[in-house]
Image (cartoon, helix red, strand yellow):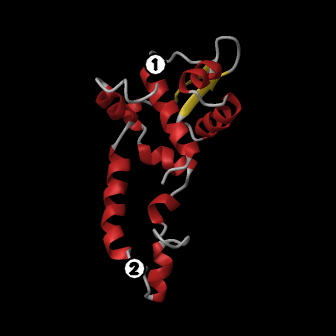
Amino acid sequence: MLSNTCKYAVRALIYLGKFSENGEKIGIKKIAGDLEIPTPFLGKILQNLVKQKILSSTKGPNGGFGLGKPAEEITLYDIVKTIDGEDFFRNCLISLEPCSTHHAEGKPCAVHNRFSEVRSELMEFYSNTSIAKIIADMKGHEDVIKL
């Protein structure tokens, strides 16, 4: 499962991809208010994404946040890797260690073989799903997704 921090990051990137056009920046208070995320918490998340060059930021009265690269180039995998780390894609479903740890001992967990397929499909989905694709797929679903 994704952490709430990661879910907030995904929502913020979708929001910025949808509403910050032509390089314009959106202020943290506006983003936090519209997404109903506490401003200080969102600020930490967005600054982390700026450090990773997924977002860009500008200080000052007309400052704010915007995408650091085209929405087509930002995948869910990029976001999860930045916020939650790659453990989401590597760790055993039951244990806290990576599956490779169990392979070295020759004792994978009881669900390893079945979950391996699911993990591969998840990796493919996250790697191939961009912010732009999500925004395009949202048309007609605005009532379901709170943005």
Find disc 1 in the rendering and name its residue: 19
Instruction: Say if 56 sits above or below 49 in the image.
Output: above
100 or 116, which is in the foreground? 116
Q: Amino acid at mark 1?
A: Phe
34 or 17, which is in the foreground? 34
Point out which mark residue 110 bears. Answer: 2
- Asked if the residue under mark 2 is in contact with the one under mark 1, i.e. CB atoms within 8 Å, the reply is no
Q: Using residue 100 as the reference point, say whether residue 34 is left or right of it.
A: right
Rendered residue at 33%/50% (across/down)? 125
Q: Amino acid at mark 2?
A: Ala
Point out which mark residue 143 bears. Answer: none
Instruction: Say if 106 sits above or below 9 in the image.
Output: below
Query: In this view, which residue lies farthest toward the top?
Result: 61
Q: What element does badge 2 sit on?
A: loop
Which marked residue is nearer to the observer: mark 1 or mark 2? Answer: 2
Tell me how far mark 1 sits from mark 2, CA to CA.
Answer: 46 Å
Instruction: Say if 143 sits above or below 118 in the image.
Output: above
86 or 138, which is in the foreground? 138
Rendered residue at 71%/15% (across/down)? 60
Q: What element does badge 1 sit on?
A: helix
The spot of residue 19 in percent (x, y) is 46, 18
The spot of residue 141 in percent (x, y) is 32, 27
Mark with earlier residue (1, 2): 1
Q: Tag 2: Cα neighbours inside 10 Å, few (<14), some, or many (≥20)?
A: few
Rendered residue at 45%/27% (across/down)? 146
Rendered residue at 48%/81% (across/down)? 102
Locate residue 37: give its quadrant: top right
The spot of residue 22 in percent (x, y) is 45, 15
Q: Tag 1: Cα neighbours inside 10 Å, few (<14), some, or many (≥20)?
A: some
The spot of residue 107 in percent (x, y) is 44, 86
